[in-house]
Amino acid sequence: MRILLLPPYFKPEQMASSHLDDNRYVAFAQVGFDMELYVSSPTRGVDDETRLRYEELKKDVDYEGKMKVYRFSMFREGKNPILRALRYVLCWCKQLYYGWKAKNIDLIYLVSTPPIQGVLGGLLKKIKRVPFVYNLQDIFPDSLVGTGLAKKGGLLWKIGRVIENFTYRNADKIIVISEDFKRNIMAKGVPEEKIVVVYNWVDEEAVKHVAREDNKLFDAYGLDRKKFYITYSGNIGLTQNMDMLLEVAKELETAEPDIQFVLIGEGAYKKRVQEIIAEKNIGNVALLPFQPYEDISHVFSLGDAGLVISKPGVGENSVPSKTWSILSASRPVLANFDENELKTIVAENQCGIFTKAGDKEAFKQAILDLYNDKSRCEQLGRNGREFILKNLTRAVGTQKYVEVIKEFGV
């Protein structure tokens, strides 16, 4: 079987979820699937020298010869939302062309970033008359409503619903990352038999506990090992409620000086976070750059607890995949999130503390509870690791993807 892949990003680009793609591709290769991938020249998390090298490498072979990689030129992705949207559209047009030209394709597999990829898959399915498997990682336009970028019933929302309906109608299988996602799209008319729930997993061998004395990030960034750390790792964007987090940090700075916050990552709101820290003279928050994947255990072992946080209305149907990395590193989840499956998982497995998105006082109290009872904090972390090993390992997750693909013949 030859699978057509049209992702928005591909290694050496660095993203919070890139390991999931890599794990899937490894699993596909191991069972003998051939893959043909078309992607733009790298832009995220790469320097100019690396970008130039890959721009010159138009064709490559990866995953022990089972994947052919074809790259096309495209300007760098910036922070301007209009230019970013334009870049997505231009990449979409090129991927439509290359997908149309690709020979001997048996199946199309696409992920829902950006959401117009679903239309790409639907069109190519009609052109090439092959099955289309869609991996739904974000529900559009619901996510725009949650962030305030669109209003339900507005023009952008209506366009999003047209895109959504076209995608769901033409996909032969839709892989969703939670039961909440499944209920959401079933309410929009998607037949249950078309949907498969596969939670995003974590590579339990790649993400595990690193003792504080062995964690190189403390030395690399001059962090005091004696402090109590709350860490956030991932996209620092508009939806993560960084304003509330910084308010809590400022309020705790004098009251509990041993509590420190570390934010690891990049994003459209990072510059504003830096400005707020400077304006309010917040001294207990450190900003670290995005770290390479090989250091992921050090990243998620850095804190005494790991943050999953968003503004109200943003995470109604999602469980962020960073949750699994936090738990896999034997750290409790400190969630300030919309009430959904995440709340149930945290409560039933006693692997963290859940507070409602936007509830600043409850969130602050949760931090203090962990700080004041460190033995409980450590036990919650151990519970989280146990939950991962029983339910969300790499082998279990990738095998489910393989099974979905195999439904369409080998």
Image (cartoon, helix red, strand yellow):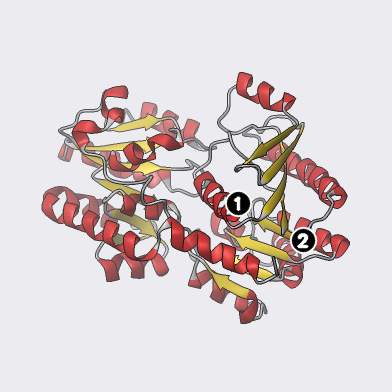
Give above or below for 400 relative to 193: above
Callout 2: SS: loop
**Looking at the image, which residue is at 58% across and 68% down?**
403
Q: Residue at x 49, y 68 (%)?
A: 178
Residue sitting at x 16%, y 36% = 258
What is the number of the mark on residue 15? Answer: none
At which x and y percent is residue 14? 54, 36
Observer-side mark, 1 or 2, equals 1
Neighbour class for label 1 at 10 Å: few (<14), some, many (≥20)? some
Residue visible at 29% across and 42% down in the picture: 301
Determine the secondary structure under disc 1: helix
Three-letter amino acid code at the position of disc 2:
Asp
In the visual, does 55 lie left or right of 297?
right
Q: Residue furthest top?
A: 49
Q: Distance from label 1 to label 2 (Cα)? A: 15 Å
Q: Nearer the viewer, residue 367 or 109?
A: 109
Which quarter of the image is occupied by the C terminus?
A: bottom right
Q: In front: 387, or 35? A: 35
Q: Amino acid at mark 1?
A: Ala
- Evaluate whether residue 266 shows in this view: yes
Q: Residues within 10 Å of mark 2 (few under 14, many from 20)?
A: some
Q: Left of 251 or right of it: where is 58?
A: right
Give the residue number, with chain letter if any, for mark 2.
106
- Looking at the image, residue 284 sits to the left or right of residue 127; the answer is left
Kindly indicate the quadrant of the structure image that contains residue 115: bottom right
Q: Which residue is mark 1?
A: 29
Above or below: residue 172 compared with residue 31: below
* Residue 284 placement (x, y as % from top left): 27, 32
